[in-house]
Image: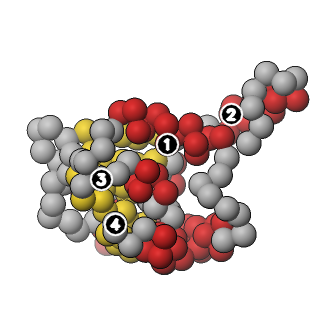
Amino acid sequence: MTKNSFLDIKAADKSYQKVRIAHWDGVARKTDKRQGFGGYYHKRLMQVVQFVVPPGQKIIEIGCGGGDLLAALWPSHGVGVDFSPQMIARARERYPHLHFIEADAHELDIQTEFDFIILSDLVNDLWDVQAVLQRIKTITSSRSRIIINSYSRLWEWPLGIARKLGLAKPN
């Protein structure tokens, strides 16, 4: 790889990062108008993760958004990481007992080991998944568990039909 190729990749990475931060800041502003964690998907996700993660664990959620999922897990030590200043501000306001860090997952610099590392709906938004997973390795122990989930838009159409037929709960 030439020096110019490397610089082009870094520039594209920074451009992508700016676009994604602007997007998630916008989402944060829109959620101010809604109450609660909202939607069947998020409620169900919370139930599933609560089933897997017992209360009182050391938990980090990378891509924590407003901090709702992290708070619902009742960690003994909870850290939320997000690169959206708007999301982090809202999380800090709503959950002052948790610790929130404004940082990009690609540049994560934390020295603490965690029992659970959560990447909820984050992987699809990453520029370099491998780089993030390599960073996460530094905050794990042999007993740590990594939870990754990803929303699939492929299910929207069939679920929409199921809702109209009364076979699924509305959001």
Label disc, if present, on residue 75 of the rendered structure: 3
Labels 2, 3: front one: 3
Looking at the image, is 3 positioned above or below residue 145?
Answer: below
Query: In screen coordinates, is 25 left or right of 76?
Result: right
Q: What residue type is labelled 3?
A: Pro
Residue most extreme to the right: 164
- Residue 15 point in image, percent of width and height: 52, 73
Say what secondary structure mark 2 lies in: helix
In space, the residues marked 4 and 3 are separated at their CA atoms by 9 Å
Q: Which of marks 4 and 2 is nearer the N terminus?
A: 4
Residue with the mark numbered 2: 154
In space, the residues marked 1 and 4 are separated at their CA atoms by 17 Å
In the rendered view of the protein, which quadrant contains the C terminus? top right
Residue with the mark numbered 4: 98
Q: Which amino acid does label 2 sit on?
A: Leu
* Whether label 2 touches label 3, CB < 8 Å: no
Which quadrant would residue 104 be assigned to in this image? bottom left
- Residue 161 point in image, percent of width and height: 84, 27
Say what secondary structure mark 4 lies in: loop
Labels 1, 2: front one: 1
